[in-house]
Amino acid sequence: MTEWFNYTAPRVKSGEVEPAVLDEAAALAAMVADPLLIRRPLIACEAGQCSGFDDNPVLQALGVYEAPEGIETCPRSHAAANPCTYPPVEAT
């Protein structure tokens, strides 16, 4: 279940959310409350289901053999002026 989590999410990186200590129900509740916690991409197709770009039969069936560089990180996650948040913060 820890593989469900986006380890670049701000709440995971800060230690506020610790995927390893959550049971399935708590993990799902946390992800519903904060979708940034969900590891992307989520894929459901006739070949099966998967999350992330780990090597697996679903991705191979779709012809994906290597994740694009940096795809699982937010390019704004290190921007102090406008970090990624959920819900999105409107610019003023």
Image (tube, grey):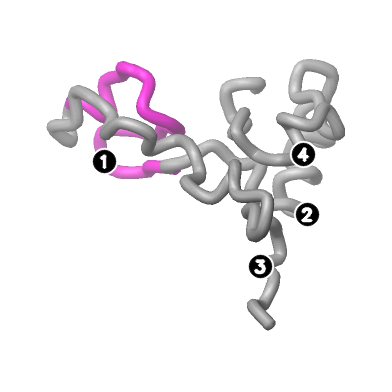
- Amino acid tagged 2: Ala
Q: Residue furthest bottom?
A: 92
Tell whether label 4 touches label 2 (CB within 8 Å). no
Numbered disc in front, either 2 or 1:
2
In the foreground, 53 or 92: 92
| Distance (Cα) linking label 2 and label 3 | 13 Å
Horizontally, residue 41 falls left or right of residue 57, namely: right
Q: Residue furthest front?
A: 81
Disc 1 is placed on an element classified as loop
Disc 2 is placed on an element classified as helix
Q: Closer to the N terminus: mark 1 or mark 4?
A: 4
- Amino acid tagged 3: Pro
How many numbered marks are there?
4
Q: Position of residue 15 (x, y in %)?
A: 82, 27
- Amino acid tagged 1: Glu
- Amino acid tagged 4: Arg
Instruction: Identify the residue under disc 2.
Output: 33
Q: Closer to the N terminus: mark 2 or mark 3?
A: 2
Image quarter of residue 59:
top left
| Distance (Cα) linking label 2 and label 4 | 12 Å
Q: Position of residue 79 (x, y in %)?
A: 60, 49
Alpha-carbon neighbours of circle 1 within 10 Å: few (<14), some, or many (≥20)?
A: few
Instruction: Identify the residue under disc 3.
Output: 88
Magenta run includes residue 56: yes
Q: Position of residue 28 (x, y in %)?
A: 73, 41
Which contiguous range is marked in magenta?
42-60
Q: Closer to the N terminus: mark 2 or mark 1?
A: 2
Q: Closer to the N terminus: mark 1 or mark 3?
A: 1
Q: Residue, x 13% and y 32% (percent of image)?
A: 63
Numbered disc in front, either 1 or 4:
4
In the foreground, 88 or 40: 88
| Distance (Cα) linking label 3 and label 4 | 14 Å
